[in-house]
Image: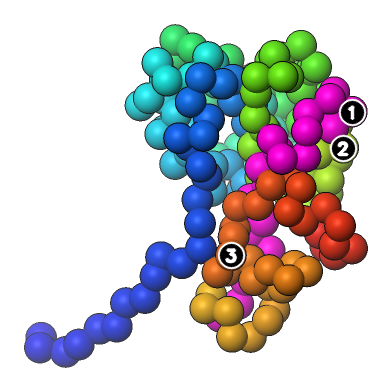
Amino acid sequence: KGQKVGIRGPYGNGYPVDSFVGKEVLIVGGGVGLAPIRSLFLTLVDRIEDFKSVVCRFGARTPEDLIYKESLFGEWQNIKGVDMKLTVDSASDGWSGNVGVVTTIVKDNDVDIKNSVVVICGPPIMMKFATQQVLGFGFRPEDIYLSMEKNMSCGIGKCGHCMLGKYYVCKDGPVFTYEQVRKYPNIWE
């Protein structure tokens, strides 16, 4: 009692949700990448009438590795204006859903590419292939938002551990458009 506690943050940026208004939003998430995009998803759902649609494609290694199971298999499946599909890399007994990496359930006709944005968050290898896939569909680099929670250590831009080109992920990110970071060689490390 009576002791002081120091609190710092939050630092960095978030998703520019207001710039998504009137568009379709495609969210591609993998593994624990669902955790950082959960708040975005809930914000989009709270404002669902502001968006043409919200299309979610989530994956995990196994059914046991899916986080937010109760919501994923329950309430989130029945939200008007939300198209939710799930997949796992490897199925276990009792799994009746799709088996394959998350990019197997992302299709070029999921959204109107000219009036959409994409949000991608997950393991770097998944983000790499999902980004390549949506670029192949015709998405512009400035319409692809990447959540780069990359190796952050100090969280205040002092250690440089999270440097991505000229950016500190902890201060300047973690959300970047692909356009901002595509020229840097260590983007997927």
Q: Which residue is mark 1?
A: 136
Do labels 3 and 1 touch, CB within 8 Å? no
Disc 1 secondary structure class: helix
Quarter of the image with the C terminus is: bottom right
- Residue range corresponding to the magenta coloring: 134-154
Do labels 2 and 3 touch, CB within 8 Å? no
Type of the residue with mark 3: Asp
Q: Residue at x 64, y 71 (%)?
A: 168
Q: Residue at x 53, y 30 (%)?
A: 20
Disc 3 secondary structure class: helix
Do labels 2 and 1 touch, CB within 8 Å? yes
Q: How is the image coloured?
A: rainbow
> Could you tell me residue 69's position as x and y percent?
51, 32
Q: CA distance from mark 2 to mark 3?
A: 23 Å
Disc 2 secondary structure class: helix
> Could you tell me residue 36's position as x and y percent?
53, 48
Q: Where 187 falls versus 7 (above or below)? A: above
Disc number placed over residue 132 in the picture, else none: 2
Quarter of the image with the N terminus is: bottom left
Near-viewer residue (31 or 69): 31
Type of the residue with mark 1: Gly
Q: CA distance from mark 3 to mark 1?
A: 27 Å
Q: Which residue is mark 3?
A: 172
Near-viewer residue (83 or 25): 25
Near-viewer residue (147 or 75): 147
